[in-house]
Image (cartoon, helix red, strand yellow):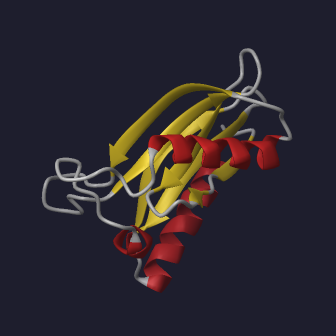
Amino acid sequence: MIMRFLILTLLMATVTTGDMLYFLGENDRRNLEKDEWWITESRISRLPDWDPERRDPPVSPRAAVRIAEKWLKKRDKSGGAAVASIEIRPFRRDLMKWPFKFYYWIRLEPRQFDHAVCVVLMDGTVLEPKVLRNPE
């Protein structure tokens, strides 16, 4: 029920603003919360381009990890966190749309048997997740 309400709310926001929403992914937390990442088409368009065959990314992997760790300390009130994985993912769904738009998907482990994901955009900002409490 909560999930349906959230999806309807997001669809209504898309219709009223005319700005398409894109789903990037989700993460289940140990505390029974689920994080989901959504981004608007206009926000993707404003991000810097990066051609991996020609130059380094606008935000280095090291800088992205520092940004993610800082974000997690604020959000989770945890001390340090181990980096479990870091991925550079494309926004495009095909080869024609946003061929040079990417983001970092960073998985951190603040505690044993727990993990968090931070999405760092190529402009150095964090895409905040939508938190679903007790998702069905």
The residue at 41%/77% (across/down) is 19
Residue 81 screen position, x and y as percent: 71, 29
The residue at 39%/58% (across/down) is 58
Residue 9 in the image: above or below residue 27: below
Q: Is residue 42 left or right of residue 99?
A: right
Residue 77 screen position, x and y as percent: 86, 41
Report the quarter where the C terminus lies.
top right
Residue 127 in the image: above or below residue 104: below
Residue 53 screen position, x and y as percent: 17, 47
Q: In this view, does 106 lie to the left or right of 71?
A: left
Quadrant location of residue 10?
Answer: bottom right
The residue at 41%/36% (across/down) is 87
Q: Is residue 80 left or right of residue 47?
A: right
In this orientation, does residue 96 appear?
yes
Q: Is residue 58 left or right of residue 36?
A: left
Q: How many labels does the image show?
A: 0
Residue 85 screen position, x and y as percent: 50, 27
Q: Please tell me which residue lies in front, 132 or 90.
A: 90
